[in-house]
Image (cartoon, rainbow, N blue to C red):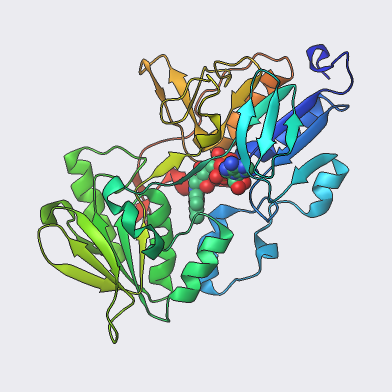
Amino acid sequence: MNASASSAQGPRRYVIIGNGVAGNQAAELLRERDPDSRITILTNSRLLFYNRYLLPQLFKGHQSWHAFLANPPEYYVQRRIEVRRDCRVVSVDTRNKQVKLAHNEPIGYDALLVATGGRSHLPEDLADCRSLFHHFGTYEAAVTTRKALPDNGTVVMLGGDMIGLDLARTLLAVSCRVILVTHETTFWPHKLTAEERADALAALEKMGIELIDGDARGGVTSVEAGAPGLPARRVVFRQGGDLYGDVVMPFYGLTPLVEFMVGTGTDIERGLLVNTTLRTSDPSIYAAGDVCQIWSEQDHAYRFYYGYKNVRAMGAVAAINMTGGHEHFATTQEETLGRDGQGHIDSPFWACE
Ligand SMILES: Cc1cc2nc3c(=O)[nH]c(=O)nc-3n(C[C@H](O)[C@H](O)[C@H](O)COP(=O)(O)OP(=O)(O)OC[C@H]3O[C@@H](n4cnc5c(N)ncnc54)[C@H](O)[C@@H]3O)c2cc1C
């Protein structure tokens, strides 16, 4: 154990908000580096940590959430990591070092890690149609979407970030029709030149995805319930025209989940701002994963680093520094968009072990 991790008042209390890749990696290292500490993971999910990368398999008929669990329940018992499920954090009292849950329970911490990830972003002008979209960010959302999709059904994807494109591959493999309404967020988080984008769009068509140029139609103005006898959803374009599908899914990139940090005085831009040690502007609070923007000397800006390897590395760096170490985050993940042997889109963003 690192000496600075102990507390005169008793075991040091580490609280982690978020039960994803970043939070779990951090918990594992915290336990290794501070064996006597108290480690609590808080999550609003009803499930233990599961592998979201495998969720497309739901569309291939794999249904039980047990198959998606990353660690068996014993893993947490053996490491004395308390996982409190169905607990939504609504605020943080930085002065008294307490996290507040939705049912008003306060939980004290000595060091806090925010690892709440992000939700799929919805452009403001589509907010009124929120209830008509189908989602894919959680096991429950993916199950609901699968149930709404008939065999050989049609999925309309708006945006087309890499999470959506990953799902598209599976949907095509199970003989669904995939219509992609392109947008500036197509291929997000990759940033492509016009030439690279044209080339990548051609590769999507080769994969079997039907493309509609959303910008050429003025963008999507609304999503409506389909009329009787027609597919369940209608997508309406601003400059006229529409298209139908069984489900419509937004893939416009991610919005970090930081609402409960607003008002704490901690620096926030879109995500929680951290230095390269992953410490926020509050010395007791760290952040890791999709929720944080890390200072980049090279870009002279705070930026996001997505992908399994980056997120896992962030969890590790945060844990090391929360236990008195001094490690800096450096991205290890190649960020270019590639092609597989068949010329189909292949992204290192999809690569996880
Ligand atoms: C379907 C899908 C497939 C993906 N496939 C890939 C892939 O193949 N390769 C890849 O590199 N990346 C992939 N990604 C992206 C990848 O999932 C993320 O980069 C990664 O999961 C981020 O991890 P995280 O720990 O930061 O957050 P998350 O995994 O999003 O975990 C956030 C946790 O915080 C909890 N939480 C949020 N708000 C609160 C709150 N207020 N109170 C309590 N708990 C809260 C959530 O319940 C969740 O447990 C995929 C994402 C999805 C959704």
The vertical placement of 94 against 233, above or below, is: above
Q: In the image, residue 146 lies at what x, y percent?
A: 49, 71
Frontmost residue, 299 versus 122: 122
Frontmost residue, 47 versus 88: 88
Frontmost residue, 319 versus 135: 135
Direction from residue 275 to residue 45 in the image, left or right: right
Q: In the image, residue 87 lies at what x, y percent?
A: 68, 46
Quarter of the picture containing the N terminus is top right
The vertical placement of 338 against 320, above or below, is: below
Residue drawn at the location 55% of the way across and 56% of the way down: 138
Residue drawn at the location 75% of the way across and 33% of the way down: 107
Direction from residue 73 to residue 175 in the image, left or right: left
Residue drawn at the location 21% of the way across and 70% of the way down: 243
Residue drawn at the location 45% of the way across and 75% of the way down: 148
Could you tell me if residue 209 is visible in this image?
no
Q: In the image, residue 112 lies at what x, y percent?
A: 67, 26
Q: Quadrant of ligand 1?
A: top right
